[in-house]
Amino acid sequence: MLGDRQDWINYNGHALSHTYDNTNGQNITTETPGNTAPQPASAFTWRAGILYNFAFGLTPYFSYSTSFVPQTSTNYQGQPFAPLTGKQLEVGLKYKVPNKDILLTASAFRIDEDHYLEQDPVHVNYSLDAGQVRSQGFEVSANANITKDLRAIASYSYVDIRYTKNNEESQRYNPYTGAYSSNSFSEQGRFVPYVPRNMFSVFLDYSLPGNSLKGFGVNGGMRYVGFRYTDNVESFKAPAYFLFDIGAHYDFGASIPHLKGLKAQLAISNLTNKYYVTQCSDYDCYVGQGRRVYGNLTYNW
């Protein structure tokens, strides 16, 4: 497989900086024009991959790709950022069990991105160029119809994402005292914040057998999200959490042919109404969604 892409960008933008000075009661306002437009840029990106389908259901593959994303924001001085560029390597296996509705997949990857933006620790409403970030890890998943009535979906991922070329330093924050450390720590080699290293989920769906219950089904599963660092120098972690979900569904067309395509579903997410934190910064944390009950009625034709 081969693919390529050509991008051009020519963004126009201007800014005015206002400075107010009330020294000696003179009330002086100074306007400084600035140019927020990045220089016109273009990029050629491409991807290539190879895979082979063995007769017994195994498909190994390898792929390489490059990327280009314009960044139209500016730093606190109004200077534009260079485009985000990257390259990705991925290798994996897919296995379709012969004569079974079972698909197993596994993949490993490495992604390098240059001109990755992070929050400016001094000018908090702006970003700064954090240099290069490397993300590497692996994913495994299974999608299987275990029986005619029972289906299972499961996945696990591990992601190690760090600053690999970074000259920035930041002070560590203590959430218990509300104080910053007296010395600064290098961000080089640290984990990028807000990204969990481990995630896992499993989900089962069971259609009830028998004519009296024809069309009814129940399902349930669990989700796990590992801890996440809260800033660029690993000051502290937002804790990991487990969540449980359940649901039921009914296919009207299974017992009433004229209603084929009409389905109803009821679901409950975060069944135990667990209190958990999705993300933290130095000053606040974001609480995850509590128990949620919702239903829907769909019709497909």
Image (tube, grey):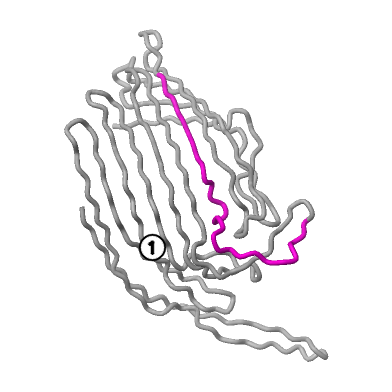
In the displayed structure, does residue 301 sit left or right of residue 126? left
User: In the current view of this chain or complex, which residue is farthest to the left?
Assistant: 55
Q: Position of residue 234 (x, y in %)?
A: 63, 55
Q: Is residue 16 above or below residue 9?
A: below
Is residue 176 located in the magenta-colored stretch of the structure?
A: no
User: In the current view of this chain or complex, which residue is farthest to the right?
Assistant: 24
Type of amino acid at the residue the image marks with label 1: Gly
Q: Is residue 269 visible?
A: yes
Q: Position of residue 42 (x, y in %)?
A: 32, 74
Q: Position of residue 195 (x, y in %)?
A: 53, 50
Q: Is residue 125 visible?
A: no
- Count of all numbered marks drawn on residues in the image: 1
Label 1, on which residue?
86
- Judge the density around disc 1: few (<14), some (14-19), many (≥20) Cα neighbours within 10 Å: many
Q: Position of residue 292 (x, y in %)?
A: 58, 33
Q: Look at 28% across and 34% down and name the residue there.
A: 95
| Magenta residues, start to end | 178-206
In the displayed structure, does residue 117 sit left or right of residue 254? right
Q: Between residues 143 and 158, which one lies in front from this camera angle? A: 158
